[in-house]
Image (tube, grey):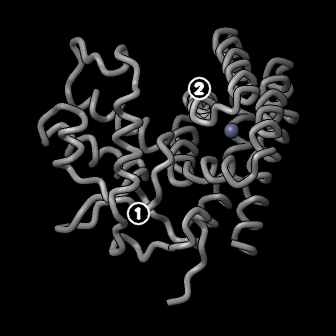
Amino acid sequence: MNTVCIQGVSGQTQAVGFFFKNNLQLDKLEAYLANQPAEFIDSGSRLRRDVAYDRLKDAIQHANLEPGELLSETRLSRLLGTSRTPVREALHQLAQEGLVQVIPGRAVTVASPSAQVVLDVVHMRLLLEPESVRLVTGSISERNLDLLKKIVGRMEEACAKGDRITWLKADTDFHKIITEACPNKLLGDTVAQMRNRTHHLANIDSQTNPTRLAECTLEHQEIVNKLSAHDADGAELATRQHVEKLRESLFTRLSYG
Ligand SMILES: [Zn+2]
Protein backbone atom coordinates (compact mmCIF):
# COMPACT_ATOMS: atom_id res chain seq x y z
CA MET A 1 0.00 0.00 0.00
CA ASN A 2 1.33 3.40 -0.96
CA THR A 3 0.82 5.98 1.74
CA VAL A 4 2.43 9.31 2.40
CA CYS A 5 4.52 9.58 5.52
CA ILE A 6 3.39 12.57 7.54
CA GLN A 7 4.59 11.40 10.90
CA GLY A 8 8.14 11.81 9.74
CA VAL A 9 9.69 9.85 12.61
CA SER A 10 9.82 6.21 11.73
CA GLY A 11 8.91 6.25 8.07
CA GLN A 12 6.23 3.73 8.93
CA THR A 13 2.79 5.06 8.17
CA GLN A 14 -0.44 4.30 9.90
CA ALA A 15 -3.03 2.07 8.33
CA VAL A 16 -5.51 3.55 10.75
CA GLY A 17 -5.16 1.55 13.88
CA PHE A 18 -4.40 -1.89 12.56
CA PHE A 19 -0.66 -1.55 12.86
CA PHE A 20 0.28 -1.46 16.51
CA LYS A 21 3.91 -0.93 17.20
CA ASN A 22 5.85 -2.45 20.04
CA ASN A 23 6.14 -1.08 23.55
CA LEU A 24 8.77 1.54 22.76
CA GLN A 25 6.29 4.41 22.98
CA LEU A 26 4.57 3.04 26.05
CA ASP A 27 7.93 3.17 27.75
CA LYS A 28 8.10 6.83 26.80
CA LEU A 29 4.63 7.27 28.23
CA GLU A 30 5.62 5.49 31.41
CA ALA A 31 8.72 7.65 31.80
CA TYR A 32 6.73 10.80 31.18
CA LEU A 33 4.01 9.96 33.69
CA ALA A 34 6.59 8.99 36.31
CA ASN A 35 8.27 12.39 35.98
CA GLN A 36 5.20 14.50 36.55
CA PRO A 37 5.30 16.85 39.53
CA ALA A 38 3.41 15.69 42.63
CA GLU A 39 1.08 18.71 42.63
CA PHE A 40 -0.14 17.71 39.19
CA ILE A 41 -0.85 14.16 40.32
CA ASP A 42 -2.37 15.02 43.72
CA SER A 43 -6.07 14.65 43.17
CA GLY A 44 -7.25 16.36 46.37
CA SER A 45 -11.01 16.54 46.10
CA ARG A 46 -11.08 16.21 42.33
CA LEU A 47 -12.77 13.31 40.61
CA ARG A 48 -10.49 10.47 39.60
CA ARG A 49 -11.65 10.66 35.99
CA ASP A 50 -10.72 14.37 35.85
CA VAL A 51 -7.25 13.62 37.19
CA ALA A 52 -6.88 10.74 34.70
CA TYR A 53 -8.10 13.02 31.91
CA ASP A 54 -5.65 15.83 32.76
CA ARG A 55 -2.68 13.49 33.06
CA LEU A 56 -3.46 11.55 29.89
CA LYS A 57 -4.14 14.66 27.85
CA ASP A 58 -0.88 16.21 29.01
CA ALA A 59 1.04 13.03 28.18
CA ILE A 60 -0.54 12.61 24.73
CA GLN A 61 0.23 16.21 23.86
CA HIS A 62 3.76 16.38 25.23
CA ALA A 63 5.29 12.91 25.70
CA ASN A 64 6.15 12.59 22.03
CA LEU A 65 3.98 9.52 21.48
CA GLU A 66 3.50 8.43 17.91
CA PRO A 67 0.16 8.63 16.15
CA GLY A 68 -1.46 5.17 16.11
CA GLU A 69 0.17 4.20 19.38
CA LEU A 70 -1.86 1.67 21.34
CA LEU A 71 -3.28 2.95 24.63
CA SER A 72 -4.19 -0.06 26.72
CA GLU A 73 -6.75 0.65 29.43
CA THR A 74 -5.18 -1.93 31.72
CA ARG A 75 -1.71 -0.52 31.41
CA LEU A 76 -2.89 3.08 31.73
CA SER A 77 -4.78 2.11 34.90
CA ARG A 78 -1.58 0.74 36.34
CA LEU A 79 0.52 3.73 35.28
CA LEU A 80 -1.99 6.18 36.70
CA GLY A 81 -2.63 4.13 39.84
CA THR A 82 -6.37 4.13 39.34
CA SER A 83 -9.14 1.74 38.31
CA ARG A 84 -10.16 1.21 34.68
CA THR A 85 -13.43 3.14 34.80
CA PRO A 86 -11.89 6.64 35.19
CA VAL A 87 -9.35 5.75 32.48
CA ARG A 88 -12.09 4.61 30.11
CA GLU A 89 -14.09 7.79 30.75
CA ALA A 90 -11.02 9.95 30.21
CA LEU A 91 -10.22 8.15 26.94
CA HIS A 92 -13.76 8.69 25.66
CA GLN A 93 -13.54 12.38 26.40
CA LEU A 94 -10.15 12.58 24.66
CA ALA A 95 -11.67 10.78 21.66
CA GLN A 96 -14.37 13.45 21.45
CA GLU A 97 -11.63 16.07 21.42
CA GLY A 98 -9.78 14.34 18.61
CA LEU A 99 -6.70 13.33 20.62
CA VAL A 100 -7.32 9.58 20.63
CA GLN A 101 -9.31 7.29 18.39
CA VAL A 102 -11.48 4.41 19.50
CA ILE A 103 -11.61 1.38 17.24
CA PRO A 104 -14.81 -0.32 18.41
CA GLY A 105 -14.23 -3.73 19.92
CA ARG A 106 -10.49 -3.47 19.31
CA ALA A 107 -8.46 -0.77 20.97
CA VAL A 108 -7.83 2.87 21.69
CA THR A 109 -4.85 4.56 20.09
CA VAL A 110 -3.27 7.99 19.92
CA ALA A 111 -5.16 9.71 17.08
CA SER A 112 -3.65 8.85 13.76
CA PRO A 113 -5.14 11.15 11.14
CA SER A 114 -4.49 10.41 7.48
CA ALA A 115 -2.42 12.85 5.41
CA GLN A 116 -5.61 14.14 3.82
CA VAL A 117 -7.25 14.81 7.19
CA VAL A 118 -4.13 16.62 8.42
CA LEU A 119 -4.14 18.83 5.33
CA ASP A 120 -7.86 19.51 5.72
CA VAL A 121 -7.43 20.41 9.38
CA VAL A 122 -4.50 22.73 8.70
CA HIS A 123 -6.60 24.38 5.99
CA MET A 124 -9.40 24.92 8.51
CA ARG A 125 -6.95 26.26 11.05
CA LEU A 126 -5.72 28.73 8.48
CA LEU A 127 -9.28 29.91 7.90
CA LEU A 128 -10.39 30.02 11.52
CA GLU A 129 -7.44 30.73 13.79
CA PRO A 130 -6.55 34.22 12.48
CA GLU A 131 -10.20 35.28 12.79
CA SER A 132 -10.44 33.91 16.33
CA VAL A 133 -7.37 35.95 17.38
CA ARG A 134 -8.81 39.02 15.65
CA LEU A 135 -11.92 38.70 17.82
CA VAL A 136 -9.84 38.16 20.97
CA THR A 137 -7.92 41.41 20.32
CA GLY A 138 -10.99 43.51 21.07
CA SER A 139 -11.68 42.05 24.48
CA ILE A 140 -8.51 40.53 25.89
CA SER A 141 -8.00 41.16 29.60
CA GLU A 142 -4.82 42.62 31.12
CA ARG A 143 -4.52 39.39 33.12
CA ASN A 144 -4.48 37.25 29.99
CA LEU A 145 -2.01 39.59 28.29
CA ASP A 146 0.22 39.26 31.31
CA LEU A 147 -0.08 35.45 31.23
CA LEU A 148 0.76 35.37 27.51
CA LYS A 149 3.85 37.51 28.06
CA LYS A 150 5.01 35.19 30.84
CA ILE A 151 4.45 32.17 28.60
CA VAL A 152 6.61 33.71 25.87
CA GLY A 153 9.24 34.20 28.60
CA ARG A 154 8.97 30.47 29.42
CA MET A 155 9.36 29.67 25.72
CA GLU A 156 12.51 31.80 25.48
CA GLU A 157 14.02 30.08 28.51
CA ALA A 158 13.07 26.61 27.25
CA CYS A 159 14.46 27.45 23.83
CA ALA A 160 17.80 28.60 25.32
CA LYS A 161 18.03 25.32 27.27
CA GLY A 162 16.84 23.18 24.37
CA ASP A 163 14.02 21.92 26.61
CA ARG A 164 11.49 20.86 24.01
CA ILE A 165 8.87 19.44 26.37
CA THR A 166 8.68 22.65 28.43
CA TRP A 167 8.47 24.61 25.20
CA LEU A 168 5.63 22.45 23.86
CA LYS A 169 3.71 22.80 27.13
CA ALA A 170 4.11 26.57 26.93
CA ASP A 171 2.78 26.47 23.35
CA THR A 172 -0.27 24.47 24.50
CA ASP A 173 -0.91 26.96 27.35
CA PHE A 174 -0.48 29.92 25.01
CA HIS A 175 -3.10 28.76 22.52
CA LYS A 176 -5.44 27.55 25.26
CA ILE A 177 -5.61 31.04 26.77
CA ILE A 178 -6.41 32.53 23.37
CA THR A 179 -9.04 29.97 22.33
CA GLU A 180 -10.76 30.21 25.73
CA ALA A 181 -10.77 34.02 25.49
CA CYS A 182 -12.50 33.97 22.10
CA PRO A 183 -15.80 35.86 22.44
CA ASN A 184 -17.35 33.50 19.87
CA LYS A 185 -17.29 30.34 21.98
CA LEU A 186 -18.10 28.02 19.08
CA LEU A 187 -15.23 29.45 17.05
CA GLY A 188 -12.84 29.16 20.01
CA ASP A 189 -13.91 25.56 20.69
CA THR A 190 -13.59 24.62 17.01
CA VAL A 191 -10.09 26.07 16.83
CA ALA A 192 -9.16 24.12 19.98
CA GLN A 193 -10.53 20.92 18.39
CA MET A 194 -8.59 21.53 15.18
CA ARG A 195 -5.42 22.15 17.15
CA ASN A 196 -5.97 18.89 19.07
CA ARG A 197 -6.20 17.00 15.79
CA THR A 198 -2.83 18.32 14.65
CA HIS A 199 -1.00 18.77 17.96
CA HIS A 200 1.58 16.15 16.99
CA LEU A 201 2.76 18.35 14.11
CA ALA A 202 4.32 20.90 16.49
CA ASN A 203 6.13 18.06 18.20
CA ILE A 204 7.52 16.63 14.99
CA ASP A 205 8.20 20.07 13.56
CA SER A 206 10.42 21.00 16.49
CA GLN A 207 12.31 17.71 16.27
CA THR A 208 12.96 17.69 12.55
CA ASN A 209 13.70 21.39 12.28
CA PRO A 210 15.95 22.57 15.12
CA THR A 211 15.73 26.27 14.26
CA ARG A 212 11.96 26.09 14.42
CA LEU A 213 11.69 26.52 18.21
CA ALA A 214 13.47 29.87 18.10
CA GLU A 215 11.49 31.08 15.08
CA CYS A 216 8.26 29.89 16.60
CA THR A 217 9.02 31.70 19.87
CA LEU A 218 9.38 34.94 17.91
CA GLU A 219 6.06 34.27 16.15
CA HIS A 220 4.35 33.99 19.54
CA GLN A 221 6.07 37.20 20.67
CA GLU A 222 4.70 38.94 17.58
CA ILE A 223 1.15 37.75 18.33
CA VAL A 224 1.46 39.07 21.92
CA ASN A 225 2.84 42.40 20.67
CA LYS A 226 -0.15 42.87 18.39
CA LEU A 227 -2.62 41.79 21.07
CA SER A 228 -1.00 44.23 23.54
CA ALA A 229 -1.33 47.05 21.01
CA HIS A 230 -4.97 46.00 20.43
CA ASP A 231 -4.05 45.81 16.75
CA ALA A 232 -6.66 43.40 15.37
CA ASP A 233 -5.30 43.39 11.79
CA GLY A 234 -1.77 42.80 13.06
CA ALA A 235 -2.83 40.00 15.41
CA GLU A 236 -4.78 38.32 12.62
CA LEU A 237 -1.81 38.54 10.25
CA ALA A 238 0.69 37.31 12.87
CA THR A 239 -1.53 34.30 13.57
CA ARG A 240 -1.97 33.53 9.88
CA GLN A 241 1.81 33.60 9.43
CA HIS A 242 2.21 31.30 12.46
CA VAL A 243 -0.10 28.65 10.96
CA GLU A 244 1.33 29.13 7.46
CA LYS A 245 4.80 28.31 8.78
CA LEU A 246 3.43 25.05 10.12
CA ARG A 247 1.81 24.31 6.77
CA GLU A 248 5.03 25.07 4.88
CA SER A 249 6.95 22.75 7.12
CA LEU A 250 4.28 20.07 6.64
CA PHE A 251 4.49 20.39 2.86
CA THR A 252 8.25 20.01 3.06
CA ARG A 253 7.81 16.74 4.95
CA LEU A 254 5.16 15.52 2.54
CA SER A 255 7.50 16.26 -0.37
CA TYR A 256 10.63 14.74 1.06
CA GLY A 257 9.45 12.53 3.90
ZN1 LIG B 1 1.94 28.25 18.64
Relative to 188, say whether 108 is above or below.
Answer: below
What label does residue 68 carry, if any?
1
Residue at 74 percent across and 74 percent down: it is 256
How many residues crowd mark 2 within 10 Å: few (<14), some (14–19), many (20+)? some
Which image quadrant: the C terminus? bottom right
Q: Position of residue 252 (x, y in %)?
A: 77, 66
Do tag 1 and tag 2 residues touch (Cβ < 8 Å)? no
**Res. 136 image quadrant:** top right
Three-letter code for the amino acid on which mark 1 is drawn: Gly
Relative to 114, say whether 185 is above or below.
Answer: above
Q: Position of residue 26 (x, y in %)?
A: 34, 50
Q: Is mark 1 within 8 Å of ligand 1?
A: no
Q: Earlier in the sequence, mark 1 or mark 2?
A: 1
- The reply, left or right, for residue 229 in relation to residue 146 is right
Three-letter code for the amino acid on which mark 2 is drawn: Ile
Q: Secondary structure at mark 1?
A: loop
Observer-nearest of 213 and 144: 213
Task: Specify the quarter for ligand 1.
Answer: top right
Q: How many marks?
A: 2
What label does residue 134 carry, if any?
none
Residue at 28 percent across and 47 percent down: it is 91
Q: Which residue is mark 2?
A: 177
